Amino acid sequence: MLGFLKREGCDSLICLWAMLLLLPLQVSPHGHDQSGTRGHSIPDRPKLLLVSFDGFRCDYIYRVPTPNFHILKDEGVMVDQVENIYITKTFPNHYTLVTGVYAETHGIVANEMFDSSLNQSFSMETDSRFDSHWWEEAVPLWVTVQKAGRRSGAVMWPGTDVKIHGVYPSKYLPYNSSVSFESRVEQIIEWFSGPEEEAVDFGVLYWEEPDESGHRLGPQSSQMDEVIAGIDEKVGFLINELKKAGLYEKMNLIVTSDHGMTQLFADNIIELDEYVSRDLYMWVDKSPVVGILPKEGKLEEVYNKLLDANPNMMVYRKEEMPPRYHYQHNSRIMPIILEAKEGWTIMQNRTGHFMLGNHGYDNTLRSMQPVFVARGPAFRQNHVKPFMRSVDIYPLMCHILSVRPLPNNGSLLNVQDLLAPEPVTSTPSVPPRAEEYSYAPVVGCFLSVVMVIGFLMVFIREVTLRQLPSLQHRRREMSQPLLQEDLHL
């Protein structure tokens, strides 16, 4: 084509044609450079580690020097009051942390349960806890993370050694209380530090203390001071190991608990045998919240015998539970619920095992509420929030991990102030999708059409002008005989 134009004397069109060919290189609808890479760098995938120290009460960090907890607080955030869920026991609250829903929704309503429809019992102390059907009324975060194409790692967290909705965590250790805290930390850090194609993005880590000591000694015991200080040392070990692995500045770290602990007294015992025969009911779960399953046809009799039996024990029909407890709408919640007042214990008689400390009481009690500190690139620094709910931790973690949360009872808006403000830059951190945010394709197409039309118009004009003299000559030749004939007339 260019050769023809040159033969015809149309060298001026070469520039126009070259501009037309270069147009796609000048206007890129997708924001790529010439090498095909985006103009913005893709940030590293966020990392999040959730750590729970069972039974670590919110005020323990002020009871003795806890420098490592305060390092996390000063470098990150702390919540003064965390309202966990009812009942304030280990399995229900740990499952809420990773699902964002109340116990009546996720189905782990107690540490010990009975399913009437299946005639089966569940206990955290038996192999029944490995039966997946108890867990599948909700979807834990590690399942969501893996379905989003990411990886998770779990060390001893309740439910992580169960195949839930057909999925185990990408990497996990079956529960074994004899494994030391240090070994657990080393394992989870190894998983976070693996090759990019194998490293986990989300991890959960569980430790049994100070819960076990709190039950045995009671939280008011002076011996608990040493236990609390030991937990702070373990936090320091975790911090140092993260630093040694080069993860400390990259990692978003949340340290929390499932519940608190309150002091019990041997004189504060409610003996059910004084009020109702054991032949009339089944006892489900332990104090301070006891599920009562009356024998067939005996519900009214059992309820009436227990109602007002002791001023330190509340007696509820399932449907009469206070709405704020969110503890009604599940078949695993027994028809009658007994709730002891703080510091009191419900037993069938005094021959049972008595503990000096316990939890499970009203979740608005300060003694039942857990600690919460967090630090990392996602969090603000040196910020104290007065109040939050434990159900809000799930949407917070989803936001940090950039995964879509499933329906839950929490709200990211409630904890937005814990997050570091988004950096203000001249260009977005993630390039916009051209079809949604860019007019470049439209402009490019329009300019291309204009250039093509312009080229054709100029081309036709140049060719026409070149042909015009010969056409005029031919017209004169064609018209001459006619003129001569006219003259002869």
Image (cartoon, rainbow, N blue to C red):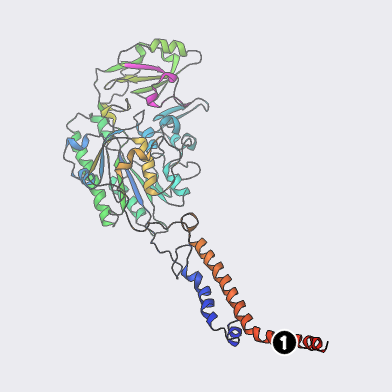
Image coordinates for residue 335, horizontal then vertical, percent = 45, 19
327 inside magenta stretch = yes
Determine the residue positioned at 28% across, 54% down: 249
Q: Quadrant of the N terminus?
A: bottom right
Q: Which image quadrant is residue 485 in?
A: bottom right
Q: Nearer the viewer, residue 53 or 213?
A: 53
Question: Residue 398 appears at what percent x and percent y?
Answer: 39, 45
Residue at coordinates 46% horizontally, 68% vertically from top-left?
36
Residue 22 in view (yes/no): yes
Name the residue located 59 percent from the left edge and 85 percent from the top edge. Answer: 3
Q: For residue 67, which quarter of the picture?
A: top left
Query: Could you tell me the amino acid type at mark 1?
Result: Arg
Q: Nearer the viewer, residue 141 or 207?
A: 141
Quadrant of res 371: top left
Q: Where 466 falls versus 142 (above or below)? A: below
Q: Which residue is mark 1?
A: 476
* Position in image of residue 27 (x %, y %): 47, 67
The residue stretch that appears in magenta = 313-333
Q: Which quadrant does the C terminus fall into?
A: bottom right
